[in-house]
Image (cartoon, helix red, strand yellow):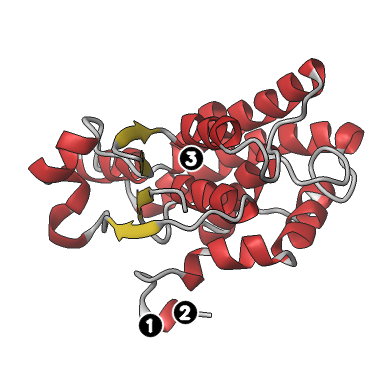
Amino acid sequence: MPNLILYNYFRSSTSYRARIALALKGLTYEYKSVHLINNGGEQHSPEFRKLNPMGGVPTLIHDGQILSQSFAIIEYLDEAFPNKHRLFPEDLFKKALVREFCQIINADIHSYANLKTLQYLENKLNIAEPQRLEWLHHFLGNGLQACEKILEKRAGQYCFGDSVTAADCFLVPMLFTAKRFNVPLDSLKNCQRVNDNCLSLESFKIAHPYNQPDTPAELRN
């Protein structure tokens, strides 16, 4: 069996991406919880910073080799275990389209809802919660509208046709985060349809934030 360890946090959307990818590929791994809030954030501990200088989750260890950043982890898993469910299409252009979609979420949307960003707005800039939420709704809403436009052209059952790809690994956690912050989603018909289709799959159920070892009891499914 693969020797895999995943340092992650139940509610981290980037960790959620990696868990979906691992579940889709049917890979077993050791779950290591890094609580992002307790004790000022366990990601700031010297021990964890030795694994990941940025102090982020997820962090994957495979046979002693350490890798961070969810996009890199998912691409690595797809290439390291090519005989499992493929997360990126073989066709070069279709692969580029999936990467483009992932990057819209990863680079242009996700960072606005990142815990580090929100803590900085609150603690350093003294921005009150109503203004933080207005800020979040603006940027997450704009980014998800771009995703919706892409899915109007490309989606089948899932983001790109009728096979789950890395794009779905990114969309579902992003919508989970958007719902946490009450971002209006009514106009995102394709995003929500794809999300519902994904959440009916066992791999997505296994990876869901409310089904993890470190999920608080009051949130467990």
Disc 3 marks which amino acid? Trp
Badge 2 marks a residue whose secondary structure is: loop
Residue 61 in the image: above or below residue 36? above
The circle on residue 220 is 2
Residue at image coords 30%, 41%: 116
Disc 1 marks which amino acid? Ala
The circle on residue 30 is none
Which of pointers 3 and 2 lies earlier in the amino acid sequence?
A: 3
Badge 3 marks a residue whose secondary structure is: helix
Coordinates of residue 147 in the picture (x, y in percent): 73, 35
Disc 2 marks which amino acid? Arg
* Residue identifier under label 1: 217
Residue 47 relative to residue 137: left or right: left
Distance, label 1 to label 3, CA atoms, is 31 Å
Could you classify mark 2 by the number of other residues whose Cα lies within 10 Å: few (under 14), some (14-19), or many (20 or more)?
few
Residue 175 relative to residue 55: left or right: right
